[in-house]
Image (spheres, helix red, strand yellow):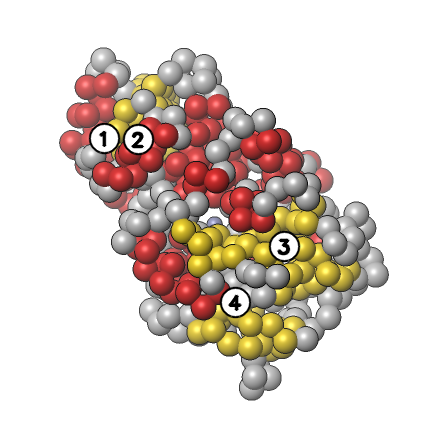
């Protein structure tokens, strides 16, 4: 079968829109028609060489909602016609973590930048016959994809696809960081550094947790305005020492209970750490380029202030549990999804979409496909 796809061939170059060949699904795999896929910053990090992947060519795209068209003989619980969200970390079901229900920590997650399917083989070829990888074992910047059932969560048919795509990555990453990683409690204070796709969802996650003070920090003024619509009580256009001073000014000199580093950890982690109250949490939700191998935090300061620095991928909870729960919160009106989408694009407009992201024009751009 043929599929139009956006193929990553060279670091620093635009992705190229090509027809690729897609092989039929293996026994544990499904063929899906992609309906919507978000323009997450992670794919952009790959295009720019800041997050290295093991091979090119590779189809990027990992924040997708889709319709199942065909299932392999050993697939259980997924049928043609099902609406699904694809997960960027598979839940293999067999490893140490999956057996505990911690699919966000699945051992197979270490291979999502490699290119092959979960079983180690390829389903995509370019017109020269060369194997084409699939980022996150998904490769959703394409009309169709073949993915393992470990990467599939079936959802209700009432959710519009563009909104469903958002709960594949940005929404659980942000909301979960507040709810499951930091465990923000009613009345707590929160700082969110970087109010893009992840950060805005930390803001709404903190609101869902009942945080009393939610300080949004960004250097793009429009994002501070958006953050207020998602529940931020204060907006701070500052970075570095000025950010620390501003946060202390808003918290009686104490600092926040929880700080979230949602952009550029090399430059934002130390200010976020110092804007956090003694005994508080600092949660990193953003990628750091592979070339940065250390961030300096004075160990004595860490010890005496008794703060915790923690990472959160996928909001530190299984996407299998989180995705249905987040969609339930959308149905009751507690979780904003529509408001996250700034613009939609066609598949051939992906490079323009990322230019808009880079320019700070988008909270989330989403590629939508016609029928
Ligand atoms: Zn993502
Ligand atoms: Zn696993």
- Distance of label 3 from label 4 (alpha carbons): 16 Å
Q: In the rendered view, would you say 147 is above or below 335?
A: below
Which residue appears at 58% of the width and 76% of the height? 20
Question: In screen coordinates, is 84 left or right of 345?
Answer: right
Q: SS at mark 4? A: strand
Picture quadrant of residue 265: top left
Residue at x 58% of width, y 26% of height = 332
What residue would you read off at disc 3?
Answer: 66
Residue 303: quarter of image = top left
Q: Which residue is mark 4?
A: 59
Residue 300 visible in image:
no
Q: Residue at x 41, y 19 (%)?
A: 211
In x, y percent, where is residue 11?
A: 37, 70
Quadrant of the rendered image containing residue 190 = top left
Mark with earlier residue (1, 2): 2
User: Are the residues flagged by discs 1 and 2 in contact, CB closer than 8 Å?
Assistant: yes
Task: Please name which of the two marks, 3 or 4, marks the residue nearer to the observer.
Answer: 3
Residue corresponding to mark 2: 216
Name which of mark 3 and mark 1 comes first in the sequence: 3
Residue drawn 63% across the image and 54% down it: 66
Circles 1 and 4: CB distance less than 8 Å? no
Q: Of discs 2 and 3, which sits in the foreground?
A: 3
Indicate which disc, 4 or 2, sits on the residue closer to the N terminus: 4
Q: Label 4 neighbourhood size at 10 Å, few (<14), some (14-19), many (20+)?
A: many
Does residue 13 appear left or right of residue 332 in this picture? left
């Amino acid at each position: 079968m043929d599929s139009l796809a956006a193929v990553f061939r060279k670091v620093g170059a635009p992705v190229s829109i090509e027809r690729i060949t897609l092989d039929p699904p293996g026994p544990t795999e499904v063929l899906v028609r992609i309906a919507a896929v978000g323009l997450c910053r992670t794919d952009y990090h790959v295009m720019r060489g800041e997050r290295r992947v093991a091979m090119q060519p590779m189809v990027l795209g990992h924040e997708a909602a889709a319709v199942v068209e065909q299932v392999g003989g050993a697939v259980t619980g997924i049928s043609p016609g099902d609406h699904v969200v694809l997960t960027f970390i598979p839940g293999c079901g067999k490893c140490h973590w999956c057996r505990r229900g911690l699919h966000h920590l699945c051992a197979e997650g270490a291979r999502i930048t490699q290119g092959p399917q979960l079983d180690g083989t390829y389903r995509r070829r370019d017109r020269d016959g060369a194997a084409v990888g699939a980022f996150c074992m998904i490769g959703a910047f394409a009309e169709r994809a073949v993915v393992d059932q470990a990467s599939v969560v079936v959802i209700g048919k009432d959710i519009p696809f563009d909104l469903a795509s958002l709960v594949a990555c940005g929404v659980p990453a942000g909301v979960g960081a507040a709810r499951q990683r930091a465990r923000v409690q009613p009345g707590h204070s929160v700082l969110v550094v970087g109010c893009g796709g992840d950060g805005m969802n930390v803001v709404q996650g903190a609101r869902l947790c009942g945080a009393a003070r939610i300080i949004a920090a960004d250097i793009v003024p429009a994002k501070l305005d958006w953050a207020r619509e998602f529940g931020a009580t204060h907006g701070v256009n500052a970075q570095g020492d000025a950010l620390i001073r501003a946060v202390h000014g808003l918290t009686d000199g104490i600092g926040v209970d929880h700080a979230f580093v949602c952009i550029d950890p090399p430059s934002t982690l130390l200010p976020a750490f110092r804007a956090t109250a003694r005994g508080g949490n600092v949660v990193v939700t953003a990628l750091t380029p592979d070339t940065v191998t250390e961030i300096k935090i004075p160990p004595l300061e860490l010890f005496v202030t008794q703060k915790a620095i923690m990472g959160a991928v996928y909001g530190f909870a299984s996407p299998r549990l989180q995705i249905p729960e987040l969609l339930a919160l959308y149905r009751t009106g507690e979780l904003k999804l529509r408001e996250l989408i700034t613009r939609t694009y066609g598949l051939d407009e992906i490079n323009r979409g990322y230019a808009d992201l880079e320019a700070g024009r988008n909270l989330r751009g989403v590629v939508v496909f016609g029928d």
